[in-house]
Amino acid sequence: MYQCKKCNDRGIVLHEGVAYRCRCWSQKILDLKIKKANLGVNFNDAKFSNFKLDYYPNTIPPDGEATYRERANKALLAAKGFVNDINTNKVKKGLFFCGPVGSGKTFLASATARELLLNNHEVLFVVVPDFLDALRFTFDKNDNGITEKGLMDVVWNIPILILDDLGAHNYTQWTVNKIYSLLNYRLNNKLPTIITSNLTLNELEILLGDRTCSRIIALCNVFRLLVPKDIRYIQSLNSMITQ
């Protein structure tokens, strides 16, 4: 069964003896870019237009600062600005999105990655706990062709790196050193980086040390997203109601 009936998934259509790119081709290219960037199918709908401020109340959270919605809108505008800065070669700092589970951090980072891919930038989306586990795996298995240096070279030098879920791991001094060396390298080489974490900078400092946190602050502008309720829970509940 072909997904595109017009070209039978060949990406090319013939009209009066002349070959043309089928309209489905652009989607195929995007899908390949998403796969290469390590963005899963769950992120296909991660678009700025789908980042709904309605999930963030116009009330002030217990910390007594800006409203939930003002914080979210500020983070959204920063993400859009980051994309624009990359497109115009004016980027100065990356982004650090922190906040509780279900506050939209990963969605916003994924939407940023998708927009960058659409503009033909090279992006890699890395889930930090999975990456650290992969690094450890290189010591346990030496016959799969994957080396620690090979993995580190990729994340060190990718033009735009997204580190998702920093802090969600059982950190040892070894893993702390790996994270530090990665962030330090990207800072020294002015490579744009986006980081998400469930932890605040103060909490990360306890976990990873002040040297690592100082690199995060130097690399990224910090945005804290807060929600009264997990957005994924609300979406799941709404889906059950409408079924």
Image: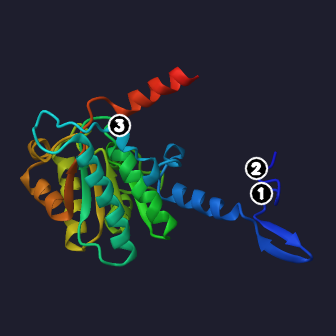
Residue nearer the viewer, 205 or 149? 205
- Viewer-closest of 132 and 240: 240
Q: Tell which circle, 3 or 2, labels the residue nearer the N-terminal end.
A: 2
Which-is-in-front pick, marks 3 and 2?
3
Q: Nearer the viewer, residue 27 or 155?
A: 27
Q: Residue at x 64, y 59 (%)?
A: 27
Taking the image as drawn, is residue 213 in sight? yes
Asked whether, in this view, residue 60 is left or right of residue 48, the answer is left
Q: N-terminal of the two: label 2 or label 1?
A: 2
Judged from the image, the secondary structure of the residue bearing numbered disc 3 is helix
Residue 240 numbered tag = none
Residue designated by label 1:
9
| Label 3 vs label 1, nearer the camera | 3
Quadrant where the C terminus is found in the figure = top right
Label 1: how many residues lie within 10 Å, few (<14), some (14-19) or many (20+)?
A: some
Q: Quadrant of residue 1?
A: top right
| Amino acid type indicated by mark 2 | Gln
State the separation of the CA atoms marked 2 and 1: 6 Å
The answer for how far apart the CA atoms under marks 3 and 2 are is: 35 Å
Figure coloring: rainbow
Q: Are marks 3 and 1 in contact (CB under 8 Å)?
A: no
- At label 3, which amino acid type do we have? Tyr
Q: Residues within 10 Å of mark 2 (few under 14, many from 20)?
A: few
Please state which amino acid type lies under the numbered disc 1: Asp
Is the C-beta separation of discs 3 and 2 under 8 Å? no
Identify the residue position indicated by label 2 in the image: 3
Q: Residues within 10 Å of mark 3 (few under 14, many from 20)?
A: some
- Judge from the rendering whether residue 146 lies leftward or rightward of residue 61; answer left or right: right
What residue is rendered at 52% in x and 56% in y? 34
Q: CB atoms at circles 2 and 1 under 8 Å apart?
A: yes
**Residue that carries the numbered disc 3 in the rendered image:** 55
